[in-house]
Amino acid sequence: MASNGRLAGKNAIITGAAGGIGLETSILFTKEGASVIMADISEPALEKALAKVKQLVPSARVETKKCDVSKEAEVKALVDAADAWGGLDIMFNNAGIMHAQDDDAVNTPENVWDLTHNINVKGVWFGCKHAVLALRRNGKKRASIINTASVVALVGAATPQLAYTASKGAVLALTRELAMVHAREGFRFNNLCPAPLNTPLLQDWLGDDQPKRMRREIHFPAGRFGEAVEQAHAVVFLASDESSFVNGHDFAVDGGMTKAYVTPE
Ligand code: NAD
């Protein structure tokens, strides 16, 4: 896809950049002219992701940085790294986990609850906190912070993952409040709410189990899961000045799933 320079001159940080949504967003951001720091907890995965970005966008101004978003000192160091480029303009707090042992109220282990919340909630808080500090330090008058929540923060799922669902609900609420607090500074905060995606993580887990697959697929009006790149396109819009009057929004990119009662046969 040709670039339109929709993010030209902007400095962006993406967490969870080696994964499905983060990598696709890194590719689109660099195509659109942003300078990007790709951050992830996994260095080998980051290396592979960087190679892909450079292959697809040879002109990309892109760096990688290892960062565990649940550690405040690492998030601070990540955000401060963008000062060398003149300070960040876009922060995509996207890193998140869904633990295999996450279950219902009775069966979710407490350590799984804590780990999920440390990464999915505290990680987003740290990202927002250090983004705000950096934006002020660099005298920025406009900025976009996008936090990845999930459709499970909007609708109930009878396939339980209680720690994950609660963590994404917290992301929705904290993003909304930050959007209000910082609106007059020109810092916008929006939520991305992806539906289940056609990523290896989910697809490998579903495998050939047709009933398990249909239990989920039936809820999609379009009759299919989403693609990571479809999330990335929405993030480009939220990151760009095209969305300058979009603030505090829960942007569901779900093929209509959260609006569905009965879906087509
Ligand atoms: P993914 O597993 O492909 O990517 C997540 C990335 O985050 C991985 O590269 C992983 O190494 C990284 N990560 C994990 N813990 C980290 C930490 N502590 N610090 C820094 N990086 C860390 O998954 P994805 O689908 O690209 O997910 C991205 C976001 O989208 C997550 O927040 C996820 O909850 C959310 N989401 C995904 C789906 C889906 O179906 N894939 C649906 C709704 C929401």
Image: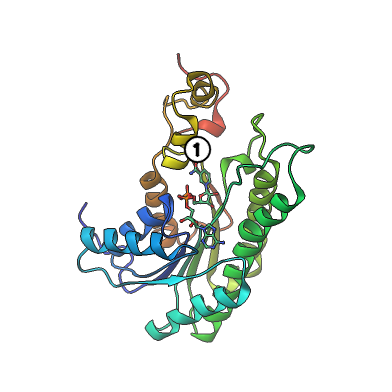
- Identify the image quadrant of the C terminus: top left
Q: What residue occupies the far right of the structure in this picture?
A: 106
In the foreground, 119 or 93: 119
Q: Say which quarter of the image contains residue 180.
A: bottom right
Residue at 32 percent across and 64 percent down: it is 50
What kind of element bears circle 1?
loop
Q: How many labels does the image show?
A: 1
Residue 186: image x %, image y %? 53, 71
Tell me: residue 186, above or below residue 23: below
In the picture as drawn, the residue positioned furthest to the top comes out as: 265
> Residue shown at 36%/53% (left/top)?
24
Q: Position of 149 compared to 89: left or right?
A: right
Q: Which x, y percent locates residue 11?
A: 39, 73
Q: Residue 205: horizontal and vertical position, in percent?
A: 49, 34
Q: What residue is shown at x 57% (from left), y 51% (from top)?
A: 97
How many residues crowd around disc 1 within 10 Å: few (fewer than 14), some, or many (20 or more)? many
Residue 63: percent from left, percent from top:
35, 73
Mark 1 Cβ inside 8 Å of ligand 1? yes
- At x 37%, y 56%, the residue is 23
What residue sits right under mark 1 in the picture? 196
The quarter holding residue 262 reads top right
Q: In this view, does 120 lie above or below 208?
A: below
Residue 229 vs residue 246, the one in the foreground: 229
Amino acid residing under circle 1: Pro
Q: Is residue 221 in view? A: yes
Q: Residue 30: name its quadrant.
A: bottom left
Colouring style: rainbow
